[in-house]
Amino acid sequence: MTGVALTLVLGLGLAFAESGLGLGMVLPGETAVVVLAASMRSTTDMVLLGVAVMIGASMGDHVGYLLGRKYGDKLRDTKAIRRLGVNNFDRATSMLRRRGASAVFLTRLVPIIRTLTPAAAGTAGLEYRRFAPASLAGSATWSAAYVGGGSIVAMVTSVTTDTFGRASWLLLVLLALAVVPVLIIRTVVGVRPVAAAPDVASLELASGARPYRSTFAPLIGDVHGF
């Protein structure tokens, strides 16, 4: 397997683990994507990585969605949800109640909540035809933001390495990992990132849209088939 192919597989796998298995608490997916993108040497390879990351992230969303469809309200009491935080799951379901399928897109850049929103959507019985486009759009946005950040790091380091030496590459990567997530979260949700995820009111205020109105059955209730 070539270096580029291995990078693409890693990008897809790490994005999948971040979105579907909640491993972002151990290794933030953004960190991995920025580092992988910074290692790419051509625009074509960068685009391929972006597609791989998008697919992996959406696949992870589908895992959560299918688990929600299968287990319904029982999912809230599982060990996995307790590990990620029941309060975070409640925030995800509240956002879904207000915003519908667009919540899957709007929470994509919010750590932890993005992992739980697809599961909440499945629990709520959100139609797959509405879930899938929102998942793909959110995954594409997440991928573009961090692969793009990595590409900027790569361009800058190609110049600074010649000028200041190889040590500057590591310094710039570390700087990007610290700054890029902060800038993106502040731009999208309009709040400073803190230990807890932004509340629903902040997300809705940033979106500038009215609360979603639907005829969904209660979010924690019976689960309907596809």
Image: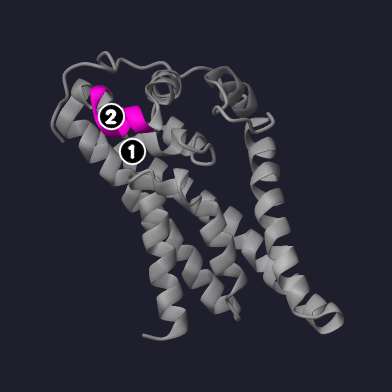
Which span of residues is magenta-colored? 77-83
Mark 2 crowdedness (10 Å alpha carbons): few <14, some 14-19, many ≥20 = many
In the rendered structure, find residue 161 and report the number of the disc placed on it. none
Q: Earlier in the sequence, mark 2 or mark 1?
A: 2
* 97 with respect to 126 (left or right): right
- Residue at disc 2, secondary structure: loop
Q: Are marks 2 and 1 in contact (CB under 8 Å)?
A: yes
* 39 with respect to 59 (left or right): right
- Residue at 37 percent across and 22 percent down: it is 86
Residue located farthest toward the left when viewing the structure as drawn: 225
Q: Choose between 7 and 165: the one closer to the eye.
A: 165
* 36 with respect to 223 (left or right): right
Q: CA distance from mark 2 to mark 1?
A: 7 Å
Image quarter (top left, top right, bottom left or bottom right) of the C terminus: top left
- Tell me: residue 151, above or below residue 136: below
* Image position, residue 64 (x, y; %): 29, 39
In the rendered structure, find residue 131 and report the number of the disc placed on it. 1
Q: Is residue 79 magenta?
A: yes
* Image position, residue 123 (x, y; %): 25, 26
Magenta-colored segment: predominant secondary structure: helix
Image quarter (top left, top right, bottom left or bottom right) of the N terminus: bottom left
Mark 1 crowdedness (10 Å alpha carbons): few <14, some 14-19, many ≥20 = many
- Tell me: residue 15, above or below residue 10: above
* Image position, residue 112 (x, y; %): 46, 36
Q: Amino acid at mark 1?
A: Phe
Q: Is residue 76 magenta?
A: no
Q: Amino acid at mark 2?
A: Leu
- Residue at 54 percent across and 28 percent down: it is 197
Q: Which residue is mark 2?
A: 126
- Tell me: residue 138, above or below residue 177: above
- Tell me: residue 38, above or below residue 22: below
- Residue at disc 1, secondary structure: helix
